[in-house]
Image: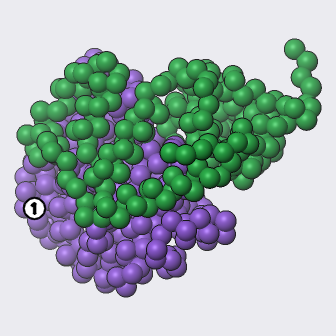
Amino acid sequence: MSVVFSKETLKLARKIQGLTGENVMLCYQCKKCTLGCPSAYTMEMKPHELMRAIQLGLEEEIFWSGTLWICLSCETCNTRCPQDINILRVIDGFREMSKDMDYYNPQPFVPALHRIFMALVERFGKIYELGLALAINMRMLTPFKDIDMAYPMLSRGKLKLLPHKSRGAKELQQVMARIRKIEHSTPSPLTGESVGGE
Amino acid sequence: MRYAYFPGCSLSSSGIEFNLSFKYVARALGIDLIEVRDWVCCGASSAHATSHLLSIALPVFNLAHAEKDGFDRLIAPCLACMSRFKAANVELEHDPELREKIDEVFDYKYQGKVKVFHPLEVFLEIGIEKIREKMRKKLKGLKVVCYYGCVFTRPPKVAQFDNVENPQSMDAIINALGAEALDWSYKTECCGVSMTLTRSDIVLKLSNDLLREAKEAGADAIVVCCPLCQANLDGRQTQIEEIYKTHYGIPILYITQLMGLAFGAYPKEVGIQKLITSPQDTLGSIGLM
């Protein structure tokens, strides 16, 4: 396959730079990111391949690979990149964009967990661990997953049955509403369109 | 010294013994902890995967509360919280556009005056000498590996503490208390906790690697400084043993629990009974239990 850089293929890299400030065109494929990545062993598209794919504008392949959601956010790649590319920030940029896109995602439960997590935080101001585990288990259709961990934790008082509400929850709800407003009024860097109302 | 204290969600549930033991050690060392008023979750790894602005706003919410109440130093024992807090400070300093948006979100304009610390940074600032002075019982005969976790030193621009690939702060404290901190190469490897509920297979593999390496290094226990690492290595140890058909039985102790015991605390005072993998044999053999 011959590879041609064109204005068209460069679009994706520029969009990502617009969103995150990171220039992936600096990557020269040294693979240091992939060699240090703890979850690269289970990625179809490894971190250095992800960088390449962005350079080539292979948007669909990136979303289809699931790499965005297998990344553990451990920051090893950022720390070691000789070109000082904040790879996690790039991945977070794609994760953020994925909200407005309809690509197939082979790892749908990871973003689902983030949504449930943030919904619980918005409701209570703190995370409700048991609720989070139950909700995501139901979503994954494995209601009894990790049930063996529950008793040792409950009996030691390390898992609360009921959620605890922060006194700051109300103030936080206002803050989160304002953030949504700001984000909905800024055009999406990928599509160039405003996402519209809530 | 007076600090704003951000316990975070973990320290009131799965990491309850970290809270107990840190407070014990803080009292002994004269660290004054005042909980951040009406604090909320830092967003951990879910916020930054959802919205960049939100991932900065959540830490700023808490930092602003601390600043308003007159604090210029904040302690966050959970590494996920600590890292998000430090990242918020660094990004606000370097990104005027982000600062503008943040100011739009909050009524109170956060000045960026609150410096964020992990307990270990504060301990080392107080000094190894002072820690040694407080020691009532030597931890002689105890061999451990220190596990720092993923974001303790990473990225260095944000963490701004200790050696990035080979951190030494816990090792220094452990050695000062008379125990032996063994050398191993997994100090800053990731345990995978951010995927603990969704991709447990990854977490089990990574945690198994850590437990296996610790055993091979000859450790009686793994010493940690993050409630998420602890919950993973301790809470999932039985599952790991079943899946990988092996036996570890390695207790996962918080650095503050060992410091507390060395300072003369009863095991209960530093939450030893809350650990799932029992440290009875390990601590009993050196007369600490």
> At which x and y percent is residue B31?
27, 78
Q: Quadrant of residue B259?
A: bottom left
Using the rendered image of the protein, determine whether residue A136 is visible from the camera's viewpoint.
Answer: yes
Quadrant (top left, top right, bottom left, bottom right) of the N terminus of chain B: bottom left
The residue identified by callout 1 is B269
Q: Residue at x 74, y 50 (%)?
A: A18
Q: Position of residue A33 (x, y in %)?
A: 65, 38
Q: Vertical placement of A117 versus B116: above or below?
A: above
Horizontally, residue A188 falls left or right of residue B207, namely right
Horizontal side of residue B124 vs B17, given as left or right: right
Quadrant hosting residue B127: bottom left
x then y, percent, for residue B11: 25, 55
| Callout 1: SS | helix
Apparent side of residue B196 relative to residue A1 in the rendered image (left or right): left
Residues packed near mark 1 inside 10 Å, few (<14), some (14 to 19) or many (20 plus):
some
The residue marked by circle 1 belongs to what chain?
Answer: B
- The number of numbered discs placed on residues in the rendered structure image is 1
Q: Residue at x 29, y 31 (%)?
A: A135
Colour of chain B, in one word, is purple
The disc labelled 1 sits on which kind of residue?
Glu
Q: What color scheme is it?
A: by chain
Kindly indicate which chain is depicted in green in the rendered structure: A
- Residue positioned 43% across, 61% down in the render: A175
Asked whether B159 or B288 is in front, the reply is B159
Outermost residue, front side: A197
Viewer-side residue, B155 vs B98: B98
Q: Is residue A88 above or below residue B160?
A: above
| Depicted A71 relative to depicted B226: above or below | above
Whether residue B141 is visible to the viewer of this picture, yes or no, is: no
Q: Residue furthest top?
A: A1
